[in-house]
Image: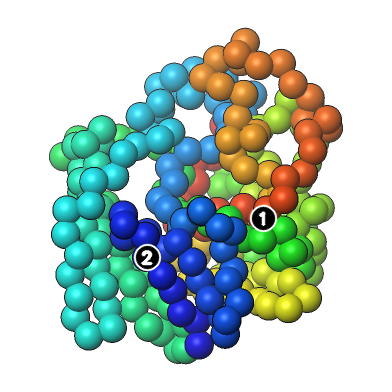
Amino acid sequence: PLAYQLDSMGFICQLYRGNEPLLKDSTSIRPCFWRAPTDNDYGAKLPEKYISAKNPSFRLTEIQQSGDTLVCHYAIEVFDGQMWLKYYPQDGGLGVTMEMTTSKPVSVFRYGVVMTLHKEFEQLRYLGRGPHENYPDRKSSAARAIYDQTVTEQYFPYIRPQETGYHTDVAWLTLSSSANKLCIVNNQSSSLLGFSALHYTTSSLDDGISKQDNQRHGALLDEQNLTEVHIDSEMMGLG
């Protein structure tokens, strides 16, 4: 069975399979609405327009429990909105759903969660579009099938660091180390997931709000000692 622990904000701060922790220490599974800006994003000035999505503050207002089900309620003031995270047992694992409502339209790059696993989670298997990276508006050349890949090969060294390694129309994925495995399954039959898994954090690929903020080369970045996984129900196209 998969056990979990919540932090003071109601976010999952550790997952356990047996006695083995899966998440990196001092990290949590958190909502995420931001991506490392692409060249096209900079051209359209989207990092500036979408800045409220980068690091929104979540204010925990209530935790409700019914049996083994927990529902955490949040206020997101920058969106003038509310969010609910629901945790519940499912098929020997853990079910997680996220809902958000806002009183006004908001602009975000993605709608999903991000988690940080140990770097040893290197083996990747998924049912979705591949083998190369693909996005909602750039996926016709990516066949939907089961793929066995590594996390290391997901990163593409663009001239400048930016969003990379994404896969769309995903039903499930597994990330494995020599000692453990994490399986993520979409339990919403009416939709499919998108995901990325990299040995880089989004912040390490982010060159700032303006293209002039940093001038780095993607091929010169060093891998980090982690595996960052994004799971999304929505991702903005590349344009």
Amino acid tagged 2: Leu
Q: Quick one: quadrant of the C terminus?
A: top right
Label 1 Cα crowd, 10 Å radius (few <14 / some 14-19 / many 20+) = many
Amino acid tagged 1: Thr
As drawn, is 210 to the left or to the right of 188?
right
As drawn, is 52 to the left or to the right of 230?
left
Residue 8: x and y, percent?
Answer: 31, 57
Q: Quadrant of residue 72?
A: bottom left
Residue at image mark 1 = 227
What is the distance, in whole Å, between disc 2 and disc 1 at their CAs? 20 Å
The residue depicted at 72 percent of the width and 45 percent of the height is 224
The residue depicted at 47 percent of the width and 56 percent of the height is 28
The residue depicted at 74 percent of the width and 72 percent of the height is 177
Whether 142 is drawn above or below 181: the answer is above
Residue at image mark 2 = 6
Residue 153: x and y, percent?
Answer: 81, 53
Q: Considering only order in the chain, which callout, 1 or 2, is on the residue closer to the N terminus? A: 2
Residue mark closest to the camera, 2 vs 1: 2
Whether 198 is drawn above or below 161: the answer is below
